[in-house]
Image (cartoon, rainbow, N blue to C red):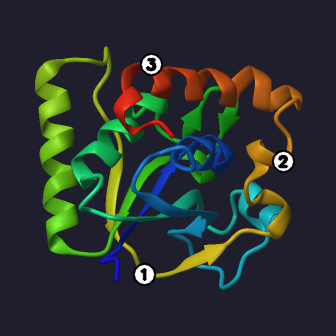
Amino acid sequence: MQNLETIVLGGGCFWCLEATYSHTKGVQSVVSGYAGGKTKNPSYEQVTSGATGHAEVVQISYDPSIIALDDILHIFFLIHNPTTPDRQGNDVGTQYRSVIFYNTKEQYDIAEKIMKELAEERLYDQPIVTELYPLKEFFPAEEYHQQYFAKNPEQGYCQAVIAPKLAKFRQKYAQFYQ
């Protein structure tokens, strides 16, 4: 029996994160959804209005004997810009913020350590603004958001935004690409 762990990450549009982690060795499932807000069972329309306080996120279930949380988080920081508050590219609003929702103190400690290391390495021109919060509730997004890139690879957004992020992941972390 596998001993899976979960973490919830927000780095802009959930389609980008879902596409990347769906191709990551050791990741058993990726569910697009919403977290960090005040509305119970929010809809996509409610979240994109910015009024609920939720971020677009993915819930990642992974096998730590295959991929460590450190690696999951290094991938996370590669495929989104953690220095832009409430924004990823053309997506603007708190729903697109960079955020890690942790489940355990150990996850918090690892995330904090990696953010500190990245800041010391000065990989970014601006400070990292990724937020760290304990996960209170996760709400799965509507079915049409699940596996969006896999279902719509030729769609314009997928080609212009998601495919380059997936290529960047494949190039830098080939050992985790599947």
Left or right: 90 with respect to 34? Answer: right
Q: Secondary structure at mark 1?
A: loop
Q: Nearer the viewer, residue 28 or 105?
A: 28
Q: The N terminus is located in which quarter?
A: bottom left
Q: Which residue is mark 3?
A: 171
Q: Quadrant of residue 139?
A: bottom right
> 124 or 147: nearer the eye?
147
| Horizontal side of residue 144 vs 33, given as left or right | right
Looking at this view, is 84 or 57 the one in front?
A: 57
Residue at 28% over, 28% down: 127
Instruction: List the residue tagged with mark 2.
Output: 151
Q: Residue at x 63, y 50 (%)?
A: 14
**Toward which corner of the image does residue 92 lie, by quadrant?**
top right
Q: Position of residue 87 (x, y in %)?
A: 57, 36
The amino acid at mark 1 is: Lys
At mark 3, the secondary structure is helix
Q: How many marks?
A: 3
Give the residue type that dot 2 points to.
Lys
Q: Residues within 10 Å of mark 1 (few under 14, many from 20)?
A: few
**Mark 2 surroundings: few (<14), some (14-19) or many (≥20) residues within 10 A:** few
- The tag earlier along the polypeptide, 1 or 3, is 1
Is tag 3's residue or tag 2's residue first in the polypeptide sequence? Answer: 2
- Of discs 1 and 3, which sits in the foreground? 3
Mark 1 and mark 3: Cα distance apart in space: 34 Å
Residue 3 in the image: x percent, y percent?
Answer: 30, 77
Task: Name which residue lies at 87% across and 26% down.
Answer: 156
Residue that label 1 marks: 136
Secondary structure under badge 2? helix
Residue 43: % across, % down: 79, 71
Which residue type carries mark 3?
Gln
Label 1 vs label 2: CA separation?
Answer: 30 Å
